[in-house]
Image (spheres, rainbow, N blue to C red):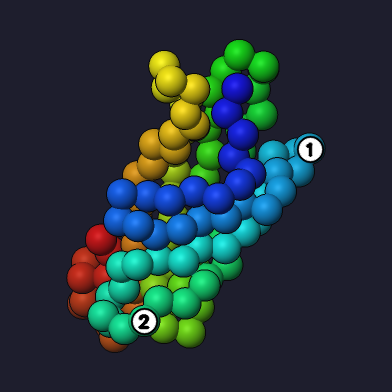
Amino acid sequence: QCQLNGLWRNDQDSLMEISTVGDNGEFQGQYLTRVTLSGGCAQVSPLRGAQQQLGEEAWPTFAFTVRWNKFSNATTAFVGQCFVDAGGKEILSTMWLLRESVGSLKEDQKGTR
């Protein structure tokens, strides 16, 4: 069974820590990205999310958002599923959508990556 709580590192060397997952599936933590829009030093940013509560044998799906604190005007939403590979290693497979602020409705499409 996959457990979301703990420290995670992605292939970009960013770190995410999920402190606790509540009985209702809600969780919170922090994210330290090594990739920034501004190219500056990254800082710890808060994250909040929810895990789908399924039976003991299921691989849980989840979603969370990160509000990039102090160094960016962007927010990112992640969705994914937790798996355990043949060697027993827990893996989070995710996709993300980043939205940064733009100056006008005409620029709307430039704000999403």
Circle 2 packing at 10 Å, graded few (<14), some (14-19), many (20+), is: few
User: Residue 17 at what x, y percent from top left?
Assistant: 57, 55
Residue holding disc 2: 41
> Identity of the amino acid at label 2?
Cys
User: Residue 20 at what x, y percent from top left?
Assistant: 71, 48
Q: Residue at x 43, y 51 (%)?
A: 9
Q: Residue at x 61, y 34 (%)?
A: 3
**Is residue 56 toward the left or the right of residue 34 in the image?**
right
**Is residue 101 toward the left or the right of residue 80 in the image?**
left
Foreground mark, 1 or 2? 2
Query: Is residue 49 something that shows in the picture?
Result: no
* Label 1 residue SS: loop
> Identity of the amino acid at label 1?
Asp
Quadrant where the C terminus lies?
Answer: bottom left
* Label 2 residue SS: loop
Q: Residue at x 50, y 63 (%)?
A: 31
User: Residue 59 at what x, y percent from top left?
Assistant: 53, 23
Quadrant where the N terminus lies?
Answer: top right
Q: Residue at x 68, y 53 (%)?
A: 19
The image quarter containing residue 13 is bottom left
User: Residue 95 at what x, y percent from top left?
Assistant: 35, 44
Seen from this angle, which residue lies furthest top? Answer: 57
Name which of mark 1 and mark 2 comes first in the sequence.
1
Seen from this angle, which residue lies furthest right? Answer: 23
Residue holding disc 1: 23
Above or below residue 6? Residue 45 is: below
Calculate the distance from the C-alpha at mark 1 to the C-alpha at mark 2: 35 Å
